[in-house]
Image (cartoon, helix red, strand yellow):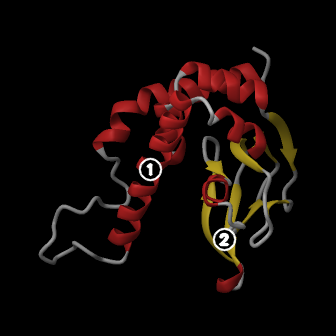
């Protein structure tokens, strides 16, 4: 759920309201492909429940990661307009909130939303890059000792942890009609 910490923790309540009003809840059955590597996607998805596997064809479909509630997928293709670099397949019956890219692009005309949205992505991607570098062993036992290790959450994420969790719970309750 780390990606949600960065994104939901940086957006404000009106942004969450907009996502709920604009997005559509979809059921995804186990074995179904949500995002197909190399094929354009027209939506950004928030995983509401269930689990998905991230797979890459170049690695013979090897599972690189599992995504669970709170993860956001399709954001990289939204940002750089390139086809997805991996497939996302449901490994159990799941549910997602699908937000059309066209609606998100329109919302980005609001400069305050755009600033919050892109800041959250920048923080997330910087954290992912630090984790990737750490996974390759950089900074372990060498000269550089200040590299963030994979399971640690940086101070920026810690600041928004409780807010992000509360917003995710609020979103789930609203989508369930509670």
Seen from this angle, which residue lies furthest left? 143
Residue at the spot x=31%, y=61% of the render? 149
Give the structural element (helix, strand or loop) at label 1: helix
Residue 149 - label: none
Q: Is residue 43 above or below residue 99?
A: below
Q: Which residue is mark 1?
A: 122
Q: Is residue 96 visible?
A: no
Q: Which residue is mark 2?
A: 85
Of marks 2 and 1, which one's residue comes earlier in the chain?
A: 2
- Residue 156, given in percent of the width and then of the height, sits at 33, 40
Q: Nearer the viewer, residue 72 or 40?
A: 40
Pointers 2 and 1 in contact (CB under 8 A)? no
Give the structural element (helix, strand or loop) at label 2: loop
Question: Left of 39 or right of it: where is 132?
Answer: left
Q: Quadrant of the C terminus?
A: top right
Query: Which of the two marks, 2 or 1, is nearer to us in this view?
Result: 1
- Residue 117, given in percent of the width and then of the height, sits at 53, 38
Q: Residues within 10 Å of mark 1 (few under 14, many from 20)?
A: some
Location of residue 64 (image quadrant) = bottom right
Question: Left of 166 or right of it: where is 20?
Answer: right
Q: Is residue 35 visible?
A: yes
Q: Quadrant of the N terminus?
A: top right
- Residue 151, given in percent of the width and then of the height, sits at 37, 56
Q: Residues within 10 Å of mark 2 (few under 14, many from 20)?
A: some
- Residue 34, given in percent of the width and then of the height, sits at 80, 57
Residue at the spot x=28%, y=58% of the render? 148
Question: Left of 83 or right of it: where is 122?
Answer: left
Question: Left of 91 or right of it: where is 170?
Answer: left
């Amino acid at each position: 759920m780390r990606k949600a910490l960065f994104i939901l923790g940086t957006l404000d309540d009106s942004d969450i309201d907009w996502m709920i009003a604009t997005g559509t809840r979809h059921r995804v059955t186990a074995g179904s492909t949500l995002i197909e590597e190399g094929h354009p996607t027209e939506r950004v998805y928030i995983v509401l429940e269930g689990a998905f596997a991230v797979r890459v064809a170049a690695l013979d479909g090897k599972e690189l990661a599992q995504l669970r509630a709170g993860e956001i997928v399709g954001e990289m293709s939204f940002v750089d307009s390139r086809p997805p670099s991996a497939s996302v397949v449901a490994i159990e019956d799941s549910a997602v909130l699908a937000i059309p890219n066209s609606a998100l692009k329109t919302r980005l005309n609001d400069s305050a939303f755009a600033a919050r949205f892109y800041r959250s992505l920048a923080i997330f991607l910087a954290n992912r890059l630090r984790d990737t570098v750490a996974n390759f062993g950089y900074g372990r036992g060498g000269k550089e000792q200040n590299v963030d290790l994979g399971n640690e959450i940086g101070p920026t994420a810690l600041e928004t942890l409780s807010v992000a969790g509360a917003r995710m719970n609020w979103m789930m309750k609203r989508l369930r009609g509670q």
